[in-house]
Amino acid sequence: MPFETPLALLALVSVIPLIILYLLRPKPLLVKIPSVMFLMQVEEKKRFFTSITKLIKDPLFLIQLLVLILLALAAAAPYIITNEPLSDEHTVLVIDMSASMQTESRFQEATSKAGDYVSKENSIVLAHNIPVILLEGQDATTTKEALSSLKAGATVADISAAMGTGMRMLLSEGGGRLVVISDFTNWEGEDPVSAKNLAESNSIKVEFVQIGKTTDNIGIIQGRLETTENGYNYNCVIKNYGDSDQNIPVEITNTDGNSETNSIDLTVKAKSTEQFVLQNLSTGTTTIKINRDDSLPADNIAYVSVPKVSNKRVLFVSDQSLLPSMTSVSLMPGIQTTSATGVPQDLTQFSVVVVAKANQSLSSSEISLLSSYINSGGKAVFIASDSLAAQGTDLELQKLLPVRTSNVTKTEKGLGMKVNQSTRLTDDLDLDEIAVYKYLNATARLDTTTLIVSEKGDVPILAYGTVGEGTVVYVGFSDQLGENSWNNFHNLPDFPVFWFKLVGWLGGSGDISEYNLKTGAVSTLAKEQEITTPNGKEITKKVLYSSAGLYEVAGRTIAVNLYNDKESDTALDGSDVISRASVKDEPSVVKATTYESKNYLDTIMIALVFILVILELYIIKKRGEL
């Protein structure tokens, strides 16, 4: 019989003191009588053997011996391994959250059918473009309440990824049932049938439930913003999925100040598209709406967000005459750069403050000014340099940084780097082209978001965090030039693009594409905060743009649209998936009908101990000793 903690068996030595105690316990007083003296002398020679015999016959001794043995064995956690049949009591419901599920009453039908599969234990996985676990291991009542409150999404679903999440849940608990509810018309990632075969090869019961029927639709399938000398033009594409030509009224509304509405009529031929262009869009939000009802409302409205352009002032505090980062930022439209060798008294006029002192450390008064600015909501960037090394950094400055710095390290072979968390700042950044010869050793703080780290040691190279109401960014790519250069980043075309994105993000402006996203996009905020979505308000640090509409995030109005031809095609039929899923092919992996389970015996042993203790008390009472 195996034990989980065999060292606990050392407790068995406790039986030795028990035996000694019973052997040495006081004997009755013996009075020698001459007539029986010979017999008593014979008894003394056999006293040891008589004591052992009496010991074995004493029920209290046997009970106490068994108690000690059972307690020692229970502490060692004995168990036996048995082959248990896989259970189907746990049901994982995978629900398609794609935009096509908004067609007519498909989503309501999906949640209704999901309720029919609710069992004793249930989990719900929402199939967005990334799996989202809504519920795990809940009872039937809680599951049905969650289903009734679900709202349809507008992403492209990765059904196989959601099935994989559900499969891992079930395998961790010894099996169960996976129910996938979808229209099966479009998806990202692997074929759902392949995911079904994999799950069934692990003896998980999988059931595909198809919902919905084909219908006609007219939708906005593409929207593209183009930069012009006078602003932005918007190219809109509308598609007719029906079998007959349609006259489509389109309503265009701009909400910048006084709301202004215009209308146009388009004739779109059957199974064809029609394009039109809106020129010189006004700032604010513009809504393009197909002014008629059809089967899929998610693609009837497109949103465009154009931020108001206002000049942003960026301060560079540096002891260098030539700073590549400042040169890059100064070329950005709507950005006014200012340089200073020290921190000025009034920082409220600056949107972003960049500290790039190579040799001279900040004074205590300068650190105090920066601290007040950041805590009040200011944005600051600290560029790695010798002055930020631990030995030359004031303790109060260390508290402002999102990393704890130590010493400057040289590397002859170059520093390998990797993206730790993907964001717009790291997109299109070719780390393999950046040669780093020197870097500042550092460790990220607990509440820091680390975007780029070294391949060895996970030294943070690009990280940010919050201080009070403000945001602080640490950039590990030093800006020094010449013989003292730490890297070649400033010589690469990615350098000005990186600084354009960084200052745009911190300053609240940035590229127009950051204000206009497709459903399924994900962004990470500097800290947990309240945002407004098309479905209401929520508090989060990671935003999944799962619905089409307008989002208010970190002071920005972000327009999110579906723009997906296949999701808008309500004439597609998912019957092919059901047909392929019904084919009984031989699985590529041998199915298992049972799993090994550890059955621990310690509970049984503890119960026996309680019974023995009660029996001991009964015997003592019977003897009149209690």
Image: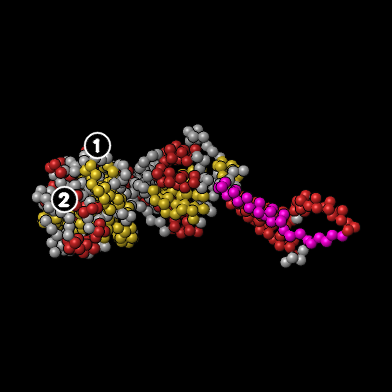
Residue 32 seen in the figure: yes
Q: Which residues are magenta?
A: 5-33
Residue assigned mark 2: 358
> Which residue is at the front of the view, 145 or 501?
501
Q: Amino acid at mark 2?
A: Ala
What residue is at 60 percent from the left and 48 percent from the top?
9
Give the left or right position of residue 478, taking residue 154 as reference: left
N-term mark: 2 or 1: 2
* Residue 9 lies in the magenta stretch: yes
- Position of 617 compared to 492: left or right? right
> What residue occupies the far front of the structure in this picture?
34
Q: Residue at x 63, y 50 (%)?
A: 13
In this rendering, the answer to whether 550 lies above or below 94 is below
Q: Quadrant of the N terminus?
A: top right
Q: Nearer the viewer, residue 388 or 84?
A: 388
Q: Amino acid at mark 1?
A: Lys
Instruction: Give coordinates of residue 133: x percent, y percent.
Output: 41, 52
Residue furthest toward the left?
321
Count all numbered tags in the image, as a single digit. 2
* Residue 572 appears in view: no
**To which residue does mark 1 refer?**
413
Examine the residues drawn in magenta and state their main secondary structure. helix
